[in-house]
Image (tube, rainbow, N blue to C red):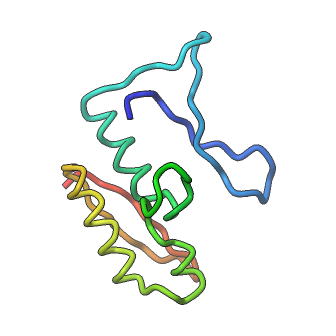
Amino acid sequence: MDALLANTQTVQGFFPFWDFQVVGNIVPIINGVEEQSQQATVICYTQKNLIPQLPGVGINWAGLLLNNETLAAIDSQIVTSLQNNSLPYKAVYTQVGTKLKLNVVLE
């Protein structure tokens, strides 16, 4: 996952999406800590089964929103995904009112 990505929201109120960031007509290639950080972030935020070519990959965020998953189960999925990819990151959760905020930080 060495191509630089950007999180974009084209229409207010619609869900944001990932896209390649283009600088001077090229997509920059990143490595080292920057690449690992991007990989950890994408792993933690990708909805399970969102990518047809990668069935079963991702976190079941929709299950949490529908009360079919607990936050403990979501956290377990995140920890497992980060460990499976040998990434030294962890999830830190905070709650602001009724909103859950996730930060992916280096351990």
Residue drawn 53% across the image and 80% down it: 63
Residue 30 picture location, percent across and down: 36, 25
Residue drawn 52% across the image and 19% down it: 27
Q: Quadrant of residue 7?
A: top right
Horizontally, is 45 left or right of 66 in the view?
left
Q: Which residue is at the front of the view, 20 or 92?
A: 20
Residue 62 lies, with reference to residue 102, above or below; the image says below
Horizontally, is 76 left or right of 71 in the view?
left
Quadrant location, the N terminus: top left
Residue 95 picture location, percent across and down: 47, 77
Horizontally, is 105 left or right of 10 in the view?
left
Q: Residue furthest top?
A: 24
Residue 5 picture location, percent across and down: 51, 34
Quadrant location, the C terminus: bottom left
Residue 11 lies, with reference to residue 1, above or below; the image says below
Residue drawn 61% across the image and 11% down it: 25
Residue 44 lies, with reference to residue 86, above or below; the image says below
Horizontally, is 63 left or right of 72 in the view?
right
Q: Which residue is at the front of the view, 102 or 65?
A: 65
Residue 20 picture location, percent across and down: 56, 30
Looking at the image, how many numbered discs can be counted on the residues? Answer: 0
